[in-house]
Image: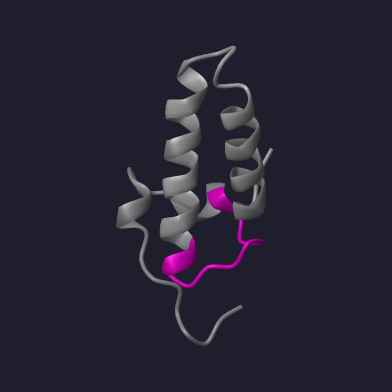
Amino acid sequence: MSVDILEVLMSAEHNFKNARVVPIAQKIALEQLHNAIVLLQKGYSLYDVFDELMAGHETVDSVPDKPADTD
């Protein structure tokens, strides 16, 4: 199942809401927020597929900027 960047943000919100019950959820949520923010700053949209962008990259920071001429 592929998730888009919007779904990554929604999952982060869910994890923050449950951080009191599951302490590791806060760390996961912070990583999800970081990943989404970095990709948005690189020019990707909320609907770009996260898993496809990460293919072949160990970290979100190594994903190249989105080319200016694509949607």
Image color mode: one colour
The answer to whether residue 10 is left or right of residue 60 is right
The answer to whether residue 60 is left or right of residue 39 is left
Q: Nearer the viewer, residue 49 or 45?
A: 45
Q: Residue furthest top?
A: 21
> Relative to 8, is 23 above or below?
above
Q: Can residue 55 be seen from the camera position used here? A: no
Q: Count the marks: how many?
A: 0
> Relative to 6, is 68 above or below?
below
Q: Residue furthest bottom?
A: 69
Give the image location of residue 15, x and y in percent.
Answer: 59, 29
Quarter containing the C terminus: bottom right
Instruction: Identify the residue at image location x=50%, y=52%.
Output: 36
Instruction: Identify the residue at image location x=36%, y=66%.
Output: 64
Instruction: Identify the residue at image location x=44%, y=37%.
Output: 30
Q: Nearer the viewer, residue 11 or 61?
A: 11
Give the image location of residue 41, x and y in percent.
Answer: 43, 67
- Image quarter of residue 1: top right
> Relative to 10, is 15 above or below?
above
Indicate whether residue 70 is drawn in magenta. no
Give the image location of residue 28, x and y in percent.
Answer: 47, 29
- Image quarter of residue 63: bottom left
Q: Can residue 53 be seen from the camera position used here? A: yes
Range shown magenta: 40-50
What secondary structure do most residues of the magenta stretch adopt?
loop
Q: Nearer the viewer, residue 10 or 65?
A: 10
Q: Nearer the viewer, residue 41 or 64?
A: 41
Indicate whether residue 43 is drawn in magenta. yes
Give the image location of residue 44, x and y in percent.
Answer: 53, 68
Instruction: Identify the residue at image location x=41%, y=58%.
Output: 38
